[in-house]
Image (cartoon, rainbow, N blue to C red):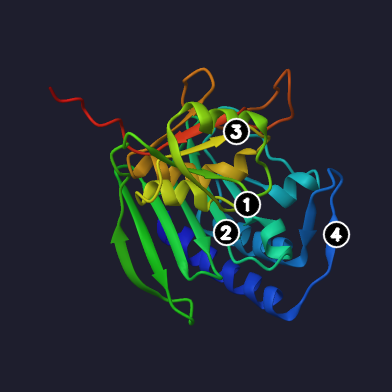
Amino acid sequence: MLATFETAALEAGKAILEVYRAGYAVALKQDMSPVTIADERAEHIILDYLARDFPSIPAIAEESVSAGRIPDIRGRSFFLVDPLDGTREFIEHRDEFTVNIAYIMNGTPVAGIVYAPALGIAFTGEPGKARKLIIDEHFAITDRLTIAVRQRPDKLMALASRCNSNAITESFLTHNDVSACTSIGSSLKFCLLAEGKADVYPRFARTMEWDTAAGDAVLRAAGGVTLTADGDPLAYGKIDQATDSDFANPHFICWGGKKNAVHA
């Protein structure tokens, strides 16, 4: 499955970069979020690969959901696809946007890829194994590096979204011994935790499951965890929610490694 994810993500990333470098028009969806032709082309490529190799597994994809194409995933494993996470970064010509594909089983992201085509890196996760991939200018994988979270230090390095910081986030950072905070867009925040470059990513603003699933799969594979405010692992396949739309996430906190043991 990860081989299909890699092929699909690399081809989608190539299509995105062609648009990125050539210029593009920006439209607004019904929820007033931006979308470009790069989102649409990348999603089409990814869904074609998934349908070809896994025709019995439904896929929930951001632009398809916006268009009303939503397969029934009740009681089933399924894919979550965000063809271009960080559209605002893309529009503002910052290179942090990503391609995201994840496989969800029993509400848990068990496999995923996050590909940042403008940065030439990707991250993959499967049970017990997370890797960072180095991608060359020909969209070929030149190296695969095993990654893991680091032990949680006394003073934390936090990650935050450039676009979604708020008072709750600032309060969390103040009360959790955060010594520094780096702002970065898209699902790369999960991946920086996964490779041990930071310790915590609090998200107290709205996200959708396709925004988080692939990065969450990478983080969990690297030894980290994504928890809701109740302390439960973030679950996927959330439909018929009383207080929000289908596939909307609650607030959550991503953690890297566990706290260092206290020695006498």
Asked if labels 1 and 3 touch by Cβ distance under 8 angstroms, the answer is: no
Q: Is residue 152 above or below residue 51?
A: above
Residue carrying label 1: 82
Q: Are marks 2 and 1 in contact (CB under 8 Å)?
A: yes
- Dot 2 or dot 3: first in sequence order is 2
Image position, residue 140 (x, y; %) = 43, 76
**Residue that mark 3 sits on:** 169
Inter-mark Cα distance, 3 to 1: 24 Å
Packing grade of label 3 (10 A; few <14, some 14-19, many >=20) is: some
Q: Quadrant of the N terminus?
A: bottom left
* Viewer-nearest of discs 2 and 3: 3
Residue 27 shows which numbered tag? 4
Q: Nearer the viewer, residue 161 or 153?
A: 153
Q: Position of residue 118 (x, y in %)?
A: 56, 71
> Considering the numbered disc 2 on the image, is that residue within a helix, a strand or a loop?
strand
**Regarding mark 3 in the picture, which secondary structure is present there?**
helix
Residues packed near mark 1 inside 10 Å, few (<14), some (14 to 19) or many (20 plus):
many
Q: Do we see residue 119 in this rendering?
A: yes
Is residue 254 placed above or below 141 in the rendered structure?
A: above
How much space separates mark 2 and mark 4, taking CA atoms? 19 Å
Q: Nearer the viewer, residue 83 or 224?
A: 224
Sequence order check: which comes first, mark 2 or mark 4?
A: 4
Residue 243 relative to residue 159: left or right: right
The answer for how far apart the CA atoms under marks 3 and 4 are is: 30 Å
Q: Quadrant of residue 50?
A: bottom right
Q: Nearer the viewer, residue 217 or 226?
A: 226
Task: Identify the residue shown where x is 31% and y is 32%.
Answer: 258
